[in-house]
Amino acid sequence: MKRVSKVLMVLFLAMAVFLTGCSGDSGQEGAQDVKAGFIYVGPTGDGGWSYAHEMARQYVVEQLGIETLYKESVEEGPDVENVMKDMIDQGANIIFATSFGYMDYMEKMSLEYPEVKFMHCSGYKMTENMGNYFGRIYEPRYLSGMVAGLKTESNVIGYVAAFDIPEVVRGINAFALGVQAVNPDAVVKVRWTNTWYDPAREYEAARALLDEGADVIAQHQDTAGPQQAAQERGVWSIGYHSDMSEAAPDAYMTAPVWNFGPYYVEQIQKVIDGTWAPESYWGSMEDGIVALAPLTENAPEGAQAVIDEAQAKIKSGELKVFAGPIKDQEGNVRVAEGELMTDDELLSFDWFVQGVEGKINK
């Protein structure tokens, strides 16, 4: 009887191990089973936005050893759906779409492919298998504005901007507030290109601002075209996305930059562990997803100490970029003293702060 009981126990344990191994309820997938897709709006060699994401993809491969796919220069339109479908056909089970204009198409794909995880950069929509992520790049933008405000002699700073969407407007305003924190007499002139990646148009927009008296050029664009225009004129520049010092070494002072790598590793590791869930993430300088690139020798004397102090206060929470009082272009108080703009207000920014010269098409 005892022998029979022992045999039954062995069979029971064997069956339990078998069922555990075959169960599909855990949601876990080994690293060898996970394939991540990345979609870029520009070429990986742009030195800017797409380059920053490509460096992060390479970091993922280095850290996790998984297989990845990527597609560069994908327009913000219906064709991105075909790119996602192709990646899914190749086995991608998590896809990162890295431009605002992909949002609606990714939402549609997430509903069509519920078994795939989708992550959209810079947007706000979510589904049961689609999240979004971004960084508070306005924090280092504020710091870069301080550098520009300390450097300018004409008190005219040019800003080459992509589209008049809240993300870009928010960045311009943060930059202008940083300028004003150290130089209340300076103004920030905005020139729209209505493109993310167009080296020639960005270059020409910068030249136009230089013709209007700007002696520092900043940008929310994906190439170093604006900085190269500044260098040709013998003036100064603030980059974006990545350290662009090699593109305009005689003009470049610093740049707000991205570090997406650790976040991508974290999200993919959650897929591997079976713990991934859609989230809406907006990381900060304290998190490390955004930062200010090291100041070069072109930066104004004494700027490093000013930046170090302000950066420490931002990271500690003592300095809030969008704390009142803040006035708009017409001089109306939009954020009262003692008040702080909410994330919802920041995500729907559609007005310029005082000191910005430009127009938003509402």
Image: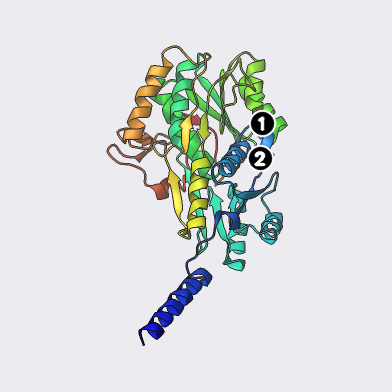
| Of residues 82 and 94, the one drawn nearer to the viewer in this rendering | 94
Instruction: Residue 206: name its quadrant.
Output: top right
Residue 353 visible from this viewpoint = no
Q: Amino acid at mark 1?
A: Glu
Residue located 29% across and 36% down the image: 337
Residue located 54% across and 41% down the image: 360
Q: Position of residue 339 (x, y in %)?
A: 30, 41
| Of residues 343 and 89, the one drawn nearer to the viewer in this rendering | 89
Q: Position of residue 276 (x, y in %)?
A: 47, 58
Q: Earlier in the sequence, mark 1 or mark 2?
A: 2
Q: Position of residue 185 (x, y in %)?
A: 43, 20
- How many C-alpha atoms fall within 10 Å of the one at disc 2: few (<14), some, or many (≥20)? some
Say if mark 1 contacts mark 2, CB within 8 Å: yes
Q: Amino acid at mark 2?
A: Thr
Q: Position of residue 133 (x, y in %)?
A: 49, 49
Instruction: Residue 174: name its quadrant.
Output: top left
Residue that badge 1 annotates: 202
Q: Which mark is residue 195?
A: 2
Residue located 43% across and 75% down the image: 13
